[in-house]
Amino acid sequence: MAHFSVIVIGKDTELELIIHQDIRVIKEQHQKNPSSSYLFKLAVLNYKIKYYDEYIKSKEIFTKKSNKQQLDYLENYFPLLLKWCKENIVTEENKHFFSFSGSEKINLPKMNKHKFDWYKLGGRSKNKIILRDIVAQELNDGKPLNYKLRVDEAKKSDISNYNDLKAFALLINGKWYEIGNAYENYSKEDKEKWENRLKELMKDVPDDDYVAIYDCHFI
């Protein structure tokens, strides 16, 4: 068994990450606890990628080809689902909001590889992100701090050490990149090559995207 760190970049880092979780573990969790939100999260993410992202990107064009009911769902109800998934609170009471086409048979998104069986924000890789001094000061009621404020997730524009972040893997724009096998030992040259590639992959990220570092467990 092994732990490895993953930098996740996007509008919602947890929803981006969960699609890469081992599907066998997701099914097992759901069987043990039917009220578990794992499958709901995956289905919500599937819908987000297929419809909601397009709607947000170009509402005017999407409005012309959608009916009133779907537009009402996208505008008023789906954002609530995203919020519930983020907070891991999908209950019997709010399941009825999960009523888009195909929800009766949840279609799990296709996965390239089984990456890990569980994850945790920060975990063994906690506090690697350092906030800019002005941001930390704002969070401290406007008072300067005599130390660097470290977190596990923040907007890119709020991070002072963005260009120095390192991890075993990177998940960005829905694509997974990694140095290699989690069990292998890598030479200094291999690590330097990977770190240079990380910087290249991360260089054009929008300032309002969120950046998080997760601790993942690999079987």
Image (cartoon, rainbow, N blue to C red):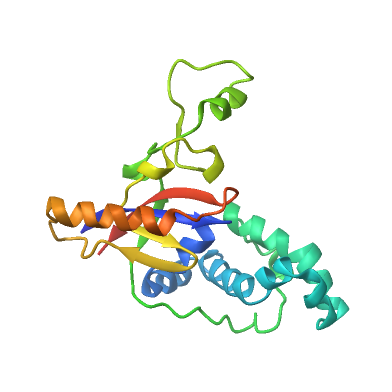
Viewer-side residue, 163 vs 4: 163
Measured as percent of width and height from the top left, residue 52 is found at 68, 70
Viewer-side residue, 90 vs 17: 17
Residue 82 vertical position relative to residue 132 in the rendered view, above or below: below
Image quarter (top left, top right, bottom left or bottom right) of the N terminus: bottom left
Residue at 32% across / 47% down in the picture? 166
Residue 98 vertical position relative to residue 124 in the rendered view, above or below: below
Residue at 72% across / 59% down in the picture? 80
Image quarter (top left, top right, bottom left or bottom right) of the C terminus: bottom left
Residue 89 vertical position relative to residue 180 in the rendered view, above or below: above
Please give left or right for residue 23 compared with residue 16 in the image: left
Residue 100 vertical position relative to residue 219 in the rendered view, above or below: below
Please give left or right for residue 137 compared with residue 32 in the image: right
Asked whether residue 11 is in view, the answer is yes
Asked whether residue 4 is in view, the answer is no
Measured as percent of width and height from the top left, residue 42 is found at 53, 70
Quarter location, residue 59: bottom right
Measured as percent of width and height from the top left, residue 217 is found at 30, 57
